[in-house]
């Protein structure tokens, strides 16, 4: 079974994210959006998936999207959460 990560940003980053991620406009605020992300996490978990919530840095996410020519979205946020988690587990090079 593969790990599924649900990316979230901090409350402090949410206002900037709201302006940068078009999907965020459908939420009334941070708590509403966070409830939705928790709902996704719970649905995945109850469905038997190995799911986790991961807080990511908004600036790193936006840079990552730009490097890959991706439109910032919730789907991209989840992909970045996985990328960032895997990258943090890579051994440091001896260079």
Image: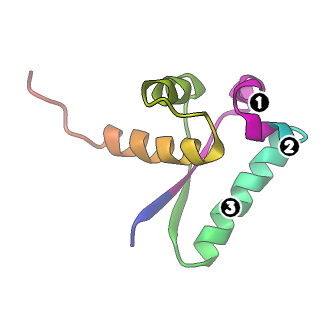
Q: In which quadrant of the rendered view does residue 59 lie?
A: top right
Measure how far apart labels 3 and 1 are at the Cα level. Answer: 19 Å
* Image position of 30 with respect to 50: above or below: above
Location of mark 3 (residue):
40
Residue at the far front in the pictured view:
69
Disc 2 vs disc 1: Cβ atoms closer than 8 Å?
yes
Mark 2 surroundings within 10 Å by alpha-carbon count, few (fewer than 14), some (14 through 19), many (20 or more): some
Residue 24: x percent and y percent? 78, 38
Location of mark 2 (residue):
27
| Colour approach in the figure | rainbow
* Magenta stretch contains residue 10: yes
* Image position of 32 with respect to 13: above or below: below
Q: Nearer the viewer, residue 69 or 39?
A: 69
Measure how far apart labels 2 and 1 are at the Cα level. Answer: 9 Å
Taking the spot 74% from the left edge, 32% from the top edge, the residue there is: 11
The answer to whether 76 appears left or right of 87 in the picture is right
| Extent of the magenta region | 5-24
Q: In which quadrant of the rendered view does residue 44 lie?
A: bottom right
Residue 87: x percent and y percent? 33, 39
Upstream in sequence: badge 3 or badge 2: 2
Measure how far apart labels 3 and 2 are at the Cα level. Answer: 15 Å
Disc 3 vs disc 2: Cβ atoms closer than 8 Å?
no
Q: Nearer the viewer, residue 10 or 65?
A: 65
């Amino acid at each position: 079974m593969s790990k599924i990560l649900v990316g979230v940003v901090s409350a402090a980053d949410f206002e900037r994210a709201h302006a940068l991620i078009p999907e965020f406009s459908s939420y009334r605020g941070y708590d509403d959006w966070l409830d939705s992300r928790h709902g996704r996490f719970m649905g995945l978990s109850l469905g038997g998936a190995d799911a986790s919530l991961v807080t990511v840095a908004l600036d790193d996410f936006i840079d990552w999207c730009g490097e890959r020519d991706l439109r910032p979205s919730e789907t991209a946020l989840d992909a970045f959460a996985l990328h960032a988690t895997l990258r943090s587990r890579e051994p440091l090079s001896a260079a």
